[in-house]
Amino acid sequence: MTTTAPSQTAVAEARDHGPARGILAAASGIVVTLLAFGVNVPELPDTVTAESARAYLVDNAGALEVFGMSMAASAALLMVLLGQVRAMIAQAENGRGFLADVAFGGGVLTAVWLLVTGAFHAATVFDGVDGLPAELVTSYYGLMSVGDTLGSASTYAKGVLMLAVGVAAIRTRALPRWLGWLSVVLGAMAVLGGLGVVENPVTPALWYGGLIGFAVWPMLVGITLIVKAIKHRRG
């Protein structure tokens, strides 16, 4: 059995498309961060009754729909970013390492959370609540709490994602080492912050640090990919 070496044209095309994919992934990461800080759920009422829940859902229908759609967009964009990161790590590990798969797996779980929490928030208002009975309005309102609870659990997936990327960056230099160490710190904060079974002042700070850190992390990775793409073009 013989194999044919790739033609010079194919090699050149692969080199040309690499930076383009990097810029697309970089833009995706930056948009994920912008959505994380720019699109939020309106403040919930202090007391929850059927009347207050109905009024909240009616008054904030547009904002909840936008939030749901932005979470779906964030999930898709996150996968674009992580697809590029996974490819870079796998290439640096010569296809023998597992960190790329671990990172991608954590990213998939995080994307699923984004889709679910967005759907739970948007589903409460897509069909309207004006004519619904009080019990159903209250249960719709409760979906948002379920989405928030899933968000707390997803912190572990975010932590695993950042830890895997960070360790891979330190080992392989697929990404700058400063980003690797920062990813390790943020990932450790996210994971350890969720382990506070006994109430203490440390784990909540770690949890929030990992939560906010992950919101910024895609933009940092995106900027790094842009710099690498520019250097590739100039080189």
Image (tube, grey):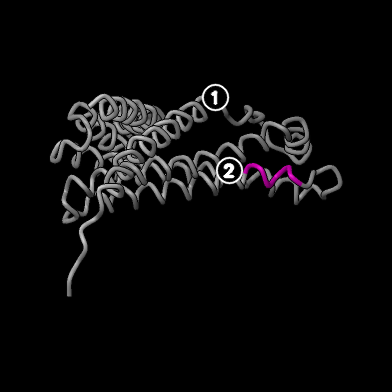
169 on left or right of 116: left
Residue 162 visible from this viewpoint: yes
Q: Residues within 10 Å of mark 1 (few under 14, many from 20)?
A: few
| Rendered view: 144 above or below 43 | below
Three-letter amino acid code at the position of disc 1: Gly
Q: What's under tag 2, amino acid-wise?
A: Gly
Secondary structure under the numbered disc 2 in the rendered image:
helix
- Residue contact between numbered discs 1 and 2, judged by CB atoms under 8 Å: no
Q: Which class describes the residues within 10 Å of circle 2: few (<14), some (14-19), or many (20+)?
A: many
Q: Position of residue 120 (x, y in %)?
A: 61, 47
Splitting the image into 4 quarters, where does residue 184 fall? top left
The kind of secondary structure element at disc 1 is helix
- Number of marks in the rendered image: 2
Which quadrant holds the C terminus? top left
Percent position of residue 31, x then y:
48, 30
Q: Residue most toward the front?
A: 8
Q: Position of residue 230 (x, y in %)?
A: 31, 25
60 over 198 or under it: above or below:
above
Please report the bounds of the magenta region as a residue range: 121-126
Observer-nearest residue: 103 or 90? 90
Q: Nearer the viewer, residue 9 or 90?
A: 9
Residue in the image at 20% along x and 29% along y:
176
The residue tagged 2 is 118
8 or 205, which is in the foreground?
8
Q: Which residue is mark 1?
A: 38
Residue 201 at least partly seen? no
Q: Position of residue 118 (x, y in %)?
A: 58, 43
